[in-house]
């Protein structure tokens, strides 16, 4: 039979033994079967722990004699990381005081002393919430039509590459590729046909991605592509290949061959931050549209 501990989805478990009330009991009960990443023996150790956007984490905190600063730290941590789950060790007289923390859905409590069975039930409840969040987050990471990354997930994935490119002085480009006259296709042939056009462009893009590149559904009719360490002289050839491949697609609505068009705007200017780079690519796309369909602009 599978040990229940093996089904926990937490990437790391932290134990904050601020006053050691019940914390040692938890250590004894789970430390042999669940890897505790760190035991935090002081208020300052907890405050210095950075769990922002760091995956599914479980933080076990003894609040039996807590200070106001610790509550403020917990509120900040819960706000910064939706995947964080917290198990609070509290005295029965403190339950009403900390009830607002439980309302977030990210926290549960134990009143020492407690049995191993009660501990197991609390951990499994927190684990179920973490699993639900992970499943929901995975679905929201992807565009349901094309299976490409959503815009927000794309930006989150690209940020480390953006920072690394600046540190290592690597070239980085961001391009927007947009289907033109999509509304006309939807009105004449229906949205299902328009969706096929979008899926075809996504397919063309994916087929040209290298392992270091990223792509997403940037907006309703636009796709974003980030390429890392691509020679500047090759960027226009790369985008031209995407455009020509898409335009040569034999897409039909019944017996009618669709007249598909696209515009592309890109930039190699990393700017002051990622938002500045995205804005410049959007300006390049707008410039291409001003020139007419099937144009490429690199700023």
Image (cartoon, rainbow, N blue to C red):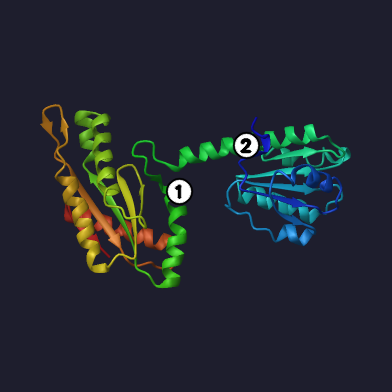
Give the image location of residue 13, x and y in percent: 68, 48
Using a 10 Å C-alpha cutoff, classify the residue at mark 1 as few (fewer than 14 neighbours), some (14 to 19) or many (20 or more): some
Using a 10 Å C-alpha cutoff, classify the residue at mark 2 as few (fewer than 14 neighbours), some (14 to 19) or many (20 or more): few
All told, the count of numbered labels is 2
Point out the image quarter for the C terminus. Answer: bottom left
Give the image location of residue 235, x and y in percent: 25, 62
The secondary structure type at the circle numbered 2 is helix
**95 relative to 294, above or below:** above
Which residue is at the front of the view, 41 or 33? 33
Can I make out residue 263 in this image?
Answer: yes
- Of the two numbered discs 1 and 2 on the same chain, state the one appearing first in sequence: 2
Q: Which residue is found at the position 16% from the left and 46% from the top?
A: 247
Give the quadrant of residue 186: top left
The disc label shown at residue 7, or none: 2
The secondary structure type at the circle numbered 1 is helix
Give the image location of residue 193, x and y in percent: 23, 31
- The label nearer to you, 1 versus 2, is 2
- Left of 126 or right of it: where is 235? left
**122 relative to 172, above or below:** above
Point out the image quarter for the N terminus. Answer: top right
Q: Which residue is mark 1?
A: 153
- Left of 23 or right of it: where is 138? left
The disc label shown at residue 273, or none: none
**189 relative to 148, above or below:** above
């Amino acid at each position: 039979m599978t040990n229940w501990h093996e089904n926990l989805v937490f990437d790391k478990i932290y134990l904050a033994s601020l006053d050691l009330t019940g914390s040692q009991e938890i250590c004894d009960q789970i430390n042999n079967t669940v890897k505790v990443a760190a035991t935090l023996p002081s208020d300052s150790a907890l405050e210095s722990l950075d769990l922002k956007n760091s995956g599914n984490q479980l933080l076990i905190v003894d609040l039996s004699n807590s200070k106001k600063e610790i509550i403020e730290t917990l509120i900040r941590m819960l706000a910064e990381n939706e995947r964080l789950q917290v198990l609070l060790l509290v005295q029965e007289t403190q339950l009403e005081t900390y009830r607002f923390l439980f309302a977030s859905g990210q926290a549960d409590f134990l009143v020492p002393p407690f049995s191993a069975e009660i501990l197991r039930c609390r951990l499994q409840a927190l684990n179920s919430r973490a699993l639900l969040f992970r499943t929901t987050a995975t679905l929201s990471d992807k565009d349901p039509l094309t299976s490409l990354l959503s815009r927000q997930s794309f930006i989150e994935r690209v940020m480390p590459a953006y920072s690394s490119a600046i540190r290592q002085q690597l070239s980085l480009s961001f391009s927007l590729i947009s289907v033109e006259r999509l509304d006309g296709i939807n009105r004449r042939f229906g949205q299902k046909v328009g969706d096929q056009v979008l899926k075809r462009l996504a397919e063309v893009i994916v087929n040209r991605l290298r392992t270091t590149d990223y792509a997403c559904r940037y907006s309703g009719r636009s796709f974003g592509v980030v390429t890392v360490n691509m020679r500047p002289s090759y960027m226009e050839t790369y985008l031209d290949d995407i455009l020509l491949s898409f335009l040569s697609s034999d897409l039909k609505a019944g017996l009618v061959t669709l007249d598909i068009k696209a515009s592309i705007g890109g930039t190699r200017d990393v700017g002051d931050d990622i938002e500045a780079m995205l804005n410049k690519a959007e300006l390049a796309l707008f410039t291409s549209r001003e020139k007419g369909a099937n144009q490429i602009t690199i700023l």
